[in-house]
Amino acid sequence: MISTKFKTVDEYLAAQAPASRKILVELRAIIKSVAPKAEEVISYNMPAFKQHGVLVYYAANKNHTGFYPTGGPIKVFTKELETYTTSKGAIQFPHDRPIPVSLVKKIVKLRIKEDKEREALKTTRKKSAK
């Protein structure tokens, strides 16, 4: 089996089935609306948004769209995620339900906050080491 190594998010999206692509494009727009300064990258062969570090990943799957915000938001939003399949760092958005726009926005905002805090801590440590 030959696996495609994607170089850009647009290349990744173009390779997806039309129904999956529609959902991915919607999710991409939601994330961009909250994190307009974030850079779009391919990481682990999936689309991702990065500021200092990666904020979130997302990917097409057969019956769902995977949203990978790391573990922190999944713990914080446990109650709001009760109706979704989740794991330590992943959320599955089934294709037969709309993307929960307000929840995705809250998760991305939390990831931006966590990313800024982590970067500030790194900067403080570098200054202390000098």
Image (tube, rainbow, N blue to C red):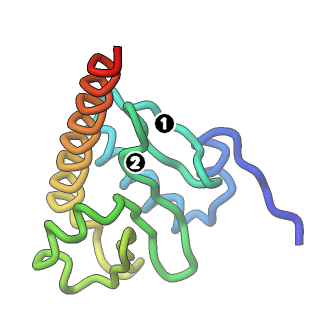
Q: Are marks 1 and 2 in contact (CB under 8 Å)?
A: yes
Residue 58 lies, in percent from the top left, at: 46, 58
Q: Along the horizontal axis of the image, is 101 left or right of 126?
A: left
Foreground pick, 113 / 36: 113
In space, the residues marked 1 and 2 are separated at their CA atoms by 9 Å
Which corner quadrant of the image does residue 106 belong to? bottom left
The structure residue drawn at horizontal position 45% and vertical position 70%, both measured from the top left corner, is: 65
Say which quadrant the N terminus sits in. Answer: bottom right
Q: Along the horizontal axis of the image, is 86 left or right of 18?
A: left
The structure residue drawn at horizontal position 37% and vertical position 55%, both measured from the top left corner, is: 27
Which residue was labeled with disc 2? 28
Amino acid at pointer 1? Glu
Answer few, some or many: residues within 10 Å of disc 2's Cα (few below 14, many 20 plus, some between 14 and 19): some
Q: Which of the two marks, 1 or 2, is nearer to us in this view?
A: 1
Q: Along the horizontal axis of the image, is 47 left or right of 105?
A: right
Which residue was labeled with disc 1? 40
Q: Which mark is residue 116?
A: none
Amino acid at pointer 2? Arg
Picture mark count: 2
